[in-house]
Image: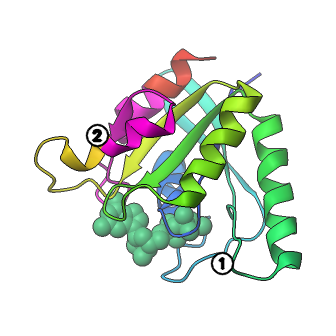
Amino acid sequence: MKPIIALVGRPNVGKSTLFNRMTRSRDAIVADFAGLTRDRHYGNGRQGRHEYIVIDTGGFEPDAGSGIFREMARQTRQAVAEADVVVFVVDVRAGVSAQDHDIANYLRRLGKPCVLAGNKAEGMQGGVQLAEFYELGLGEVFPVSAAHGQGVRGLVEQALEFV
Ligand code: GDP
Ligand code: MG
C-alpha cells in the first residue's frame, strides 16, 4: 500500500501548485482566485524509491456560502481521514490567519501526523515570517516554494517519515 498524503489549508495558499509539484502533473487546477478546486483530487507521486498518493483538497472556504463551505469542509475531513499524514499548507507572505488557527486546532484534535508547509517562501531571508507560525502549535515550519519547486523534496521526505 502506498502511503497517502493529504494537502489541506485555506484557499489560495498554493495546495494545487504543491500537488502539481508532488505529482509532476498539471492535474490539479491552479487558480488565481480562491476555492476553485472544490473536490478532492488524487495523484501519484514518487520520490526515489518511495511512491505515494497525494490528495489535493479545495480547502476550508468560509466565505463562499455555507453550502459550498460545508461541502468543501466535508471533502477536506474525508481526505484527512483517508491520509496517513497531512501536509498543512500556510502562506508565509500572508501570515497566520484565523482560518489557519481553525485548521490547526482541528488537526491537533485529530492527532494525525502533520507537517506544516510554509509556502511562497521563495526569496525570503531568515525566519522572521516563519516564526509566527509556531503559534499554531504544530511544531516546525518547513519553508517551501511550490511555484519554484524549492523545499518540496525535503517536505515530502519529512512527510514520508511519518508513514
Ligand atoms: P490553492 O487554492 O491552495 O490550491 O492555491 P493554488 O495552488 O491555486 O495557488 C494560489 C495562488 O498562489 C496562485 O496564484 C499561485 O500561482 C500562487 N502560488 C502558489 N505557490 C506559490 C509559491 O510558491 N510562491 C508564490 N509567490 N505564489 C505561489
Ligand atoms: Mg486548489
Residue 138 on the magenta segment: yes
- The circle on residue 131 is 2
The answer to whether the beta carbon of the residue marked 1 is less than 8 Å from any atom of ligand 2 is yes
Residue 36 image label: 1
User: Residue 147, which numbered label?
Assistant: none
**Residue occupying image coordinates x 76% and y 53%:** 76
Around disc 1, counting alpha carbons within 10 Å, would you say few (fewer than 14), some (14 to 19), or many (20 or more)? some
Judged from the image, the quadrant occupied by ligand 1 is bottom left
Q: Nearer the viewer, residue 30 or 67?
A: 67
From this view, report whether residue 38 is shown above or below residue 154: below
> Which SS class for mark 2?
helix
Q: What is the crowding at mark 2: few (fewer than 14 residues within 10 Å), some, or many (at least 20)?
A: few
Q: Quadrant of residue 134?
A: top left
User: Does residue 7 appear anywhere in the picture?
Assistant: no
- Magenta-tinted stretch: 132-157
Amino acid at dot 1 = Leu
Q: Is residue 80 placed above or below 24 in the rendered structure?
A: above
**Relative to residue 62, is residue 123 drawn left or right?**
left
151 or 106, nearer to the observer: 106
Which x, y percent locates residue 133?
39, 43
